[in-house]
Image (cartoon, rainbow, N blue to C red):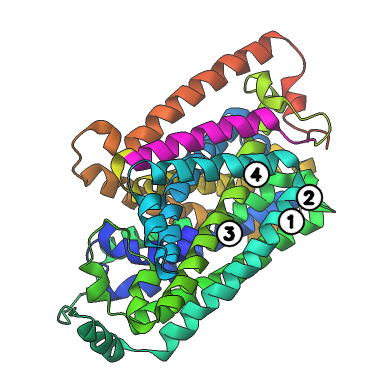
């Protein structure tokens, strides 16, 4: 899932974290460090607990059932809202493709009036339908999108790597524009860490691998390998893509752009391209963003299903389609939450609000995963003995402690930046929206958990073992 992460975030960060200037690529590299530690924790825990609901299962068995719920509900909220935020920005790219192909009326319809909102909702519920049909339909949809996404993304890398700032200034001048004068941007550690915390959100896609759990073939081997392989491939693509764009486009130009419309790689490289070329790389961005949606829906629906199966959430969420074996109630609920994300983005006219919610959610989630990696051997030694990644206690300790330290730093910096931002009303503050939804979800969980205790049974034994596949 590399859509918004690469076509928008490395450029939007100039606006969301003013002052980052020329330090975007180093900040991206720094953001990869705690993300890689979290990926190692996920890989190790997935090798021991290859079941649906990944992060919930890992924290509930490694820490406590309620912490497992908090970790995964935070993730569910963040990803579900971002599904809506991503869906809301896709019509912008589709409109760019239409405009590049000479269909100006279509472009206007996609962006004016209710067009953008309707398209975003159709995308969300269309991919709910794909997930409902089962993994075969999911595979037939996702793999072609992935291949097309990398192929079209390669055009951006080639164009950016073969142009420079001088060529950009000349091209922009011919089009009637100007590049702001170069200016100094001294390194500031607080700004650098704040930008890295935002860019950290680009690396969360590997989490979706763990959520499918037992639906994979030979999951105890396949899941950890897929997590680590995916992280490596995606990180290399991110760095190449971002470095290529900034090689061609001065950061001063990006930082001077308005927040609306959202700055994108395709718009930044437009001065170098023909109309058809602009349509091609804009289509690449649209495909990449569309490619995000089915994976995130798969991930969040399996989380909800796992809660209900363990008895820490209402039992309606455990409902499975009788023939396609997909968690239909959880998919509908996740689609409804994504719809909230669409409406929030439409009301705020901003993609970044949804991203900020996701950043907080995933930092909390990954922090608890690193803690679960540290705690599992003491709390549940039988499950810990199944790990095939980080089998050595010292290796687990190094990864877990370093992950907790860096993720805590990122979380503290991001929360401080959020609290310092000026907003007109409380619900324009992403941290407040996240907190309200978390409080409601936790209240529902506590009620269900007490009911589960009242029904009897050995809860300690239940949360010391894995559910059936």
Residue, x 51% and y 57% (percent of image)?
Answer: 289
Per the image, label 2 sits on a secondary structure element best described as: helix
Q: Which numbered dot is residue 298?
A: 4
* Magenta residues, dominant SS class: helix
Q: Are marks 1 and 2 in contact (CB under 8 Å)?
A: yes
Per the image, label 4 sits on a secondary structure element best described as: helix
Per the image, label 1 sits on a secondary structure element best described as: helix
Q: Which numbered dot is residue 140?
A: 1
Q: Nearer the viewer, residue 134 or 402?
A: 134
Q: Is residue 24 left or right of residue 50?
A: left
Examine the structure image and report whether residue 326 is included in the region drawn in magenta.
yes
Look at the image and give the residue range highlighted in magenta: 325-346
Q: How far apart are the alpha carbons under marks 1 and 4? A: 14 Å
Q: Nearer the viewer, residue 101 or 81?
A: 101
Residue at image mark 3: 399
Picture layout, residue 178 above or below residue 318: below
Q: Could you tell me residue 202's position as x and y percent?
A: 48, 59
N-terminal of the two: label 1 or label 4?
Answer: 1
Residue at image mark 2: 136
N-terminal of the two: label 3 or label 1?
Answer: 1
Picture layout, residue 389 above or below residue 314: below
Q: Are marks 2 and 3 in contact (CB under 8 Å)?
A: no
Q: Are marks 1 and 4 in contact (CB under 8 Å)?
A: no
N-terminal of the two: label 4 or label 3?
Answer: 4
Q: Are marks 4 and 2 in contact (CB under 8 Å)?
A: no
């Amino acid at each position: 899932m590399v859509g918004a992460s690469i076509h928008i975030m490395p450029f939007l960060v100039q606006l969301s974290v003013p002052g980052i200037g020329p330090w975007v690529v180093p900040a991206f590299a720094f953001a990869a460090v705690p993300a890689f530690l979290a990926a190692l924790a996920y890989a190790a825990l997935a090798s021991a607990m290859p079941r649906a609901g990944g992060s919930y299962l890992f924290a509930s068995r490694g820490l406590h059932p309620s912490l497992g719920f908090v970790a995964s509900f935070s993730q569910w909220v963040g990803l579900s809202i971002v599904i809506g935020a991503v869906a809301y920005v896709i019509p912008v790219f589709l409109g760019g493709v239409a405009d590049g192909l000479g269909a100006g009326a279509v472009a206007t319809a996609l962006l004016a009036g209710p067009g953008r909102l309707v398209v975003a909702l159709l995308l969300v519920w269309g991919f709910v339908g794909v997930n409902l049909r089962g993994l075969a339909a999911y595979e037939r949809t996702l793999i072609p999108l992935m291949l097309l996404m990398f192929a079209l993304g390669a055009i951006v890398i080639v164009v950016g790597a073969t142009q420079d700032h001088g060529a950009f200034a000349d091209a922009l001048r011919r089009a009637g524009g100007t590049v702001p004068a170069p200016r100094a941007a001294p390194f500031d550690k607080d700004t650098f860490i704040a930008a890295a915390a935002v860019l950290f959100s680009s690396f969360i896609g590997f989490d979706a691998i763990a959520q499918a759990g037992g639906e994979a073939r030979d999951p105890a081997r396949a899941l950890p390998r897929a997590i680590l392989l995916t992280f490596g491939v995606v990180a290399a693509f991110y760095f190449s893509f971002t470095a290529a764009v900034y090689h061609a486009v001065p950061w001063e130009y990006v930082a001077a752009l308005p927040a609306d419309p959202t700055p994108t790689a395709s718009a930044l490289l437009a001065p170098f391209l023909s109309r058809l070329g602009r349509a091609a790389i804009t289509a690449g961005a649209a495909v990449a963003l569309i490619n995000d949606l089915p994976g995130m829906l798969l991930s969040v629906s399996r989380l909800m299903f796992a809660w209900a199966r363990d008895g820490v959430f209402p039992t309606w969420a455990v409902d499975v389609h009788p023939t396609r074996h997909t968690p239909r109630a959880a998919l509908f609920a996740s689609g409804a939450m994504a719809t909230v994300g669409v409406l929030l983005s439409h009301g705020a006219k901003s993609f970044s609000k949804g991203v900020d919610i996701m950043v907080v959610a995933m930092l909390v989630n990954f922090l608890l995963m690193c803690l679960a990696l540290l705690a599992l051997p003491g709390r549940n030694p039988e499950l810990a003995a199944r790990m095939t990644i980080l089998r050595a206690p010292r290796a687990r300790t190094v990864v877990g402690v370093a992950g907790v330290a860096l993720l805590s730093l990122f979380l503290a910096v991001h929360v401080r930046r959020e609290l310092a931002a000026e907003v007109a009303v409380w619900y324009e503050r992403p941290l407040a929206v996240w907190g309200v939804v978390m409080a409601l979800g936790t209240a529902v969980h506590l009620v269900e958990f007490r009911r589960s205790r009242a029904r009897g049974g050995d809860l300690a034994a239940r949360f010391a073992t894995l559910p059936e596949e």
